Amino acid sequence: MIWIELLILLTCIVIGARLGGIALGTVAGIGLFVFVFLFGLPPGGPPQSVLGMIIAVITALATMQAAGGLDYLVSIAEKVMRKRPQYITFVAPVVTYLLVMASGTTHVIYAVLPVIAEVSRTGKVRPERPLSISVIAGFQGVVASPISAATVAMLGFILAEGVSLPRMLAITVPSTLLGVVIGSLAVAWRGKSLEEDAEYQRRLASGQLKAAAASTVLEGKDLFRARGSMLFFLLGITFVVLIGIFPTLLPEYQVVGKGVSETDQVSMGMAIMIVMIAIAGLIMILFKASPEAALKGTIMRSGITAIICILGISWLGSSFFEGNRNTIVGGISHLLEAYPWTFAIGMFVLSTMLFSQAATVAILLPVGVALKLSPLMLVALYPAANGIFFLPTYGTLLAAVSFDQTGTTKIGRYLLNHSFMLPGLVTVVSTIVIALLLSRLMS
């Protein structure tokens, strides 16, 4: 019976991923209905704390975007990249990484990809080099960000296992950043120079190359609102990290039950929700962020998509796992005990199907916890959820290809021989190796 249930689970994932958007969550709901009402499996449950944290963080992000804070972040990134065009292959991925790390979403890089393409072309650097590694660096930034949906989902599982946010970041930040640097080296001299590239010379001669579009310029009150919203958002992130480092900052309160008064402490997950919702409110009041604009922005749309996907797919996975816990744990526990790194292969493969680090974490982390894998080991293997680049169908990959007017960034005739494969594999593998070394030092 477990094989039929597994087939249903995988079918829901494949169909949902193919339809895209919220379909990953809604199609999972069909599978959940079959499991519970027809097969009699336990219903399991969605990760409520994880969903709550994601909603709070996305609300703060969307509010900052409505106030212009996201545009301001992008403008800073653009200035940095234009200063040293000859080093764009190394500067662009680091800037992209930091931008995504600060904002918690890869969607911000849509605004910088055309800048990278234009700066590299004017600096006579093959655009494929900085564009390919910058897209991969964006995925790395998601893993390193303390407020990305994926990290929040990860945190929701490992907090109960005794790993705090600062300990997690002490592994993910240096490993992902070093992975980006190694990935940059892997593509720094890749392909022919523009002067020798036949396709570029053909496009240049035919007049196909166009000037880059002007970027958003913020002035006066708009600039004040943008700066202020960004500052408050970053202060909120800083405060979250601080209470993670110093748990004594978490408030205590009295609970009265059966005539006895006990002291309890606000959980880290609840603290994150409170702080980020408060930050969103302050940005709306102080910097005139429109609630309507926040709801209609790209951040809120992508956030709602992530929430629905995680709700459906994690609930489906929870029902399947709870109904087959003994079989699953008994079947793969010996393999993972001997070779715990093989868990990374599962994360990588699943992420290539789901195109979402958060959904991958929501499905597999409960399995890792149930199998008694070390919490620090799970953190070290977290970057394996960045297998999104493997199939060249994700939005940022396609955007990078379309923004490169020189034609050097491409998908390839055989699907998998695309521009992002080399930097992606080098970056993910090197990141996991470094993260495993750091986790051993911390254990």
Image (spheres, rainbow, N blue to C red):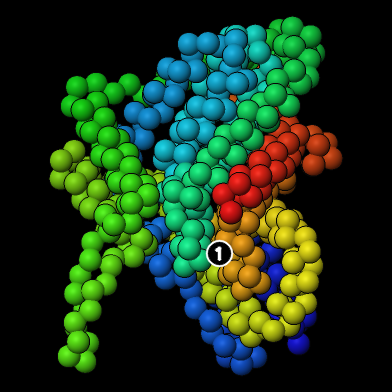
Q: Which residue is situated farthest in the right direction here?
A: 414
Residue drawn at x 72%, y 46% is 391
Q: Which percent across, then down, holds residue 241? A: 37, 47
Whether residue 43 sits left or right of residue 335 in the image: it is: left
Q: Which percent across, then down, holds residue 372? A: 63, 70
Q: Which percent across, then down, holds residue 284? A: 20, 45
Residue drawn at x 19%, y 74% is 254
Q: Quadrant of the C terminus?
A: bottom right
Q: Looking at the image, which is closer to me, 405 or 100?
A: 100
Q: Amino acid at mark 1?
A: Ala
Q: Quadrant of the N terminus?
A: bottom right
Task: Provide the secondary structure element on which disc 1 rests.
Answer: helix
Residue 136 seen anywhere in this rendered image of the structure: yes
Q: Is 421 placed above or below 367 here? A: above
Q: Looking at the image, which is closer to me, 162 or 190?
A: 162
Q: Looking at the image, which is closer to me, 283 or 200?
A: 283
Q: Which percent across, then down, holds residue 35? A: 62, 85
Disc 1 packing (10 Å; few <14; some 14–19; many ≥20): many
Q: Is 340 placed above or below 292 here? A: below
Whether residue 296 sits left or right of residue 13 in the image: it is: left
Q: Looking at the image, which is closer to me, 357 or 25?
A: 357
Which residue carries the number 1 mark? Answer: 362
Residue 78 figure quarter: top left
